[in-house]
Image (tube, rainbow, N blue to C red):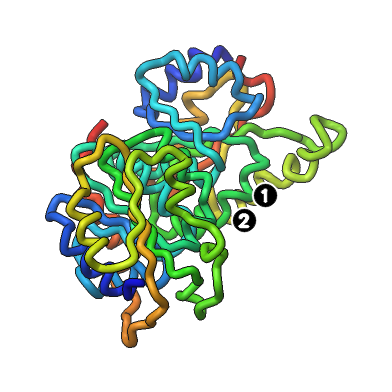
Amino acid sequence: MDAQAFWNVLKARGLTFFAGVPDSTFTAAYNVMVKDPEIRYIPAVREDVALGIASAAYFAGRLGGVMMQNSGIGNIVNPLTSFSLMYKIPVLLIVGWRGYGGPPNDAPEHWIMGVKSPEIFDLLDVPHEILEADGLESTLDRLLAVMHQRSVPGALLVRAGVIE
Amino acid sequence: MIDRYKAIERILQHVKADDLVLSTTGMPSREVFMADDRPGNFYMIGSMGLLSSFGLGIALLTPQQRVFVLEGDGSALMSLGTLPLIASEGPANLVHIILDNEAYESTGGQPSISSHVDLADIARSCGYGHVVRVDDIEGLEDALLGVGSHASPQLIMVKAGIAPVEGIPRVSHSPTGIRDRFKSCFRGGN
């Protein structure tokens, strides 16, 4: 999927306030984003900090987004449980899925989280979807509908090479 | 040293109807709740360390409102990286107040490391445009009178004593109740 097309779909749904920690999965998307004056991106120092910033969008009647690598899922477990899920404040987590499929894919530091990422979201009852090269609109709309209905965060898992 | 509850009372006396007040987990939120429960207060009852980043997002999205972020030394130390981030983003409407009692008082008064490090110095070196350290109620009053006259985020570090106040209730509002009334006070759009 073309990086510009990815952002066009997100912007069409009002997603223009983001914070995050970079991941190589999003290099192309990042390069498009920083040139787009309609998108506000705050370069957070940690994934939990990004979640805290992006969640503020809810109070402006908007949906905020977090861009992060799946290695940072551990850093957001506490804010997800004792902030987002407790206050029922939705935020879209766009998660680079490093180590997809486990060894020998990607680097050793991604092997365990590569397997466990969707399981952790399941355990926390955070809805999630996997982005494929086609069908972003239907995948995202399905996820956003569940997030809106339950008023909770949701995660879009993105594998390497899906956004180019 | 200032008694923390007296410091919170004094800070809240300077809060205007349109201001937003965010308070950290544990005793500070319970004390703000007891001193002046108002819809524009957001009590962060969980997620220690998250308040400053949430406050940054709020301040960026409603630049016409003053946003008071009240946290302790333990909370500030937990999310120290947020200090340079706030300074870097630079919302002038953000008033960061650290109630530094050099302890984790909410969990029994265990010592923190802030007796060895000066959080005001750290904030200054992170790029906060205006930083004051206050040790008494008169100093706090002066610092609060200066709120709003600066072009960048400001930080007030209040050296507070450990003097537990008896009978501080827990915040009685539900989490979604806190959320909804705070949202009704939020004026920012884009």
Q: Quadrant of the C terminus of chain B?
A: top left
Residue A88 falls in which quadrant of the image? bottom left
Asked whether residue B80 is in view, the answer is: yes
Q: Chain of mark 2?
A: A
Q: Is residue A55 above or below residue A15?
A: below
Question: What label does residue A104 carry, if any?
Answer: none
Asked whether residue A94 is in view, the answer is: no
Question: Residue type at mark 1?
Answer: Glu
Q: Are marks 2 and 1 in contact (CB under 8 Å)?
A: yes
Q: CA distance from mark 2 to mark 1?
A: 6 Å
Q: Which residue is mark 1?
A: A119
Q: Is residue B113 above or below residue A162?
A: below
Q: Which residue is mark 2?
A: A123
Mark 1 Cα-neighbour bin, 10 Å: few <14, some 14–19, many ≥20: few
Question: Residue type at mark 2?
Answer: Leu
Furthest residue to the right?
A104
Give percent across and percent down for residue B53. 43, 46
Q: Is residue A93 above or below residue B42?
A: above
Side of A81 relative to A26 (left or right) = left
Between residue A10 and residue B163, name the one nearer to us.
B163
The secondary element bearing badge 1 is classed as: helix
Between residue B85 and residue B114, name the one nearer to us.
B114
Give percent across and percent down for residue A14. 35, 28
Q: Is residue B163 above or below residue A129?
A: below
Q: Which residue appears at 22% of the width and 70% of the height?
A: B9
The secondary element bearing badge 2 is classed as: helix
Mark 2 Cα-neighbour bin, 10 Å: few <14, some 14–19, many ≥20: few
